[in-house]
Amino acid sequence: MRKLMIAAPKSGSGKTILTCGLLELFLRREFPVASFKCGPDFIDPLFHKKILGQESRNLDSFFETPEGLRDVFFRGTAGKEEGLALIEGVMGYFDGLGGITPQASAWDIAGILDCPVILTVDAKGASLSLIPLIKGFLDYCPEGRRERGPGIAGIVLNRVSPMIYPELKKVLERELKIPVAGYIPSLDFLRIESRHLGLVLPDEIADIQEQIRRLAGILEETLDVDLLLELSELHTRPKGTDKRILKKEAAQKPGESFRLGVAMDEAFCFYYRENLEAMEEAGGILVAVSPLHDKKLPPDLDGLLLGGGYPELYAKDLSENESMRQSIRGAAEAGMPILAECGGFLYLLEELRTEDGRIFPMAGVFPGGSERGKRLGNFGYLTLTAVEEIPFLSKGIAVRGHEFHYWQAEEQGEAAQAQKPAGKREWLCMRSYKNTLAGFPHLYYRSCPDFTEAFAGCCRAYQKRRV
């Protein structure tokens, strides 16, 4: 099918703006489109979903094998084979694990998927100097490896004056022998602010949909959309070289299914679609719950996922919902399987200190509190290995994940060892209590099928006791 990756020389070049504008543009043309985000980012896919009204998926070649990555792609494009897959890159085009290897970079993923790339270049304050910059990206091949896939197929210039663009386009195309597919002018209306974990969430921007619609209207005039569609059809592999991995059916036999609560509200919303599907394929029936708004957990739950998010921004409301805090603490005491990641971990502590110094009681499953640190904690990819028998993870079994957080806990735990994939840095983390496992790492379940099966098995066992 048609596919395009929107990449850039570095972060902040305009990848998200271009991707969101194109998604809205194709949507108004009623052209089938599926969206993806390279890397472990949770927030950009929420913007994609806000525009399309459908899930956006993460493509990550550290979490997945090449075959697994193509499987994720096939799942996300099912039913849209006559349309376009639009993939937003991550960081700079070649930036991968630890900043010193191209693995898990946008370049790596584009090669695995045989995907043409549009390089988005921030041209503010530059003109002819763009030529050596872009030429370097066209000529460079990491570690001497041959370029896989079509590579960079076209250029889009960001923050360019409409007056200079026509002549600049001619010069770039003449010197670089690559098409320039349009430009994004400097915009004075698009207000997508950032904070400590990246962009603010789309639901926090009152007029985000109107801003995106206005952006798409401008891009319809400044981009050569027909050329982009033409470039999206560039492929290097013969047809039929990739085998689809068929999605497993969810468990249907009596007693195999279980009801799995998923915390989903303004405070908790960071989940990989592939994780939720993995639980569904293991028999999970997903039930949305809100620690912010619901008074207590549903009585028929067999397990609970408390994902990441921004509990520090909603600490007062979470604390004032005392009945839900007691309900979750009671579920943990009763042995309900609970997995809490990052923000979910903060919620299970005794208290949370906000950035302004106020302290609010939390669920109290684990003693101790948390507060904002001076810098990102253990930022980046990791492999998590159990150093003792803990819920859902046997000793010596490893699962992949990543960390990205400013808030720090007084005690991170010592039930597992995290190790960076690039370099020798490692540290102890994860706390467990009965059937609750909590810590800062965001885990990617498909990297360890044993983990998924163990969690599902605990939920079924709890269901039998509950019933």
Image: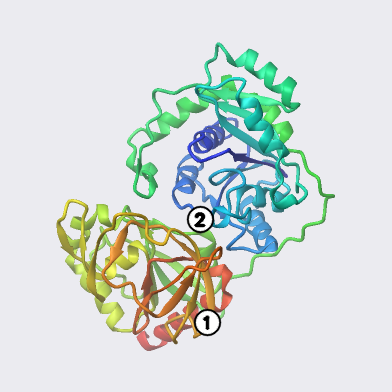
Q: Is residue 170 above or below residue 17?
A: above
Alpha-carbon span between mark 1 and mark 2: 35 Å
Name which of mark 1 and mark 2 comes first in the sequence. Answer: 2
Q: Secondary structure at mark 1?
A: loop
Give the residue at x 78% y 49%.
146
Q: Is residue 167 above or below residue 178?
A: above
Q: Is residue 325 left or right of residue 53?
A: left
Quadrant in the picture for the C terminus:
bottom left
Callout 2: 10 Å neighbours few (<14), some, many (20+)? many
Residue 464 is situated, as x and y percent measured from the top left of the image, at: 41, 87
Residue 203, numbered circle: none
Q: Is residue 30 visible?
A: no
Residue 32 is situated, as x and y percent measured from the top left of the image, at: 63, 40
Q: Is residue 201 above or below residue 395?
A: above
Question: Residue most toward the top?
Answer: 163
Residue 323 location, quadrant: bottom left
Q: Number of callouts in the render?
A: 2
Residue 447 is situated, as x and y percent measured from the top left of the image, at: 58, 69
Give the residue at x 28% y 70%.
348
- In this view, the residue in front, 423 or 346, is 423
Q: Which residue is mark 2?
A: 40
- In this view, the residue in front, 456 or 446, is 446
Give the residue at x 27% y 73%.
328
Callout 1: 10 Å neighbours few (<14), some, many (20+)? few
Residue 319 is situated, as x and y percent measured from the top left of the image, at: 18, 62
Residue 223 location, quadrant: top right
Q: Nearer the viewer, mark 1 or mark 2?
A: 2
Q: Which residue is mark 1?
A: 254
The amino acid type, in three-letter code, at marker 1 is Pro
Q: Secondary structure at mark 2?
A: loop
The amino acid type, in three-letter code, at marker 2 is Pro
Quadrant in the picture for the N terminus:
top right
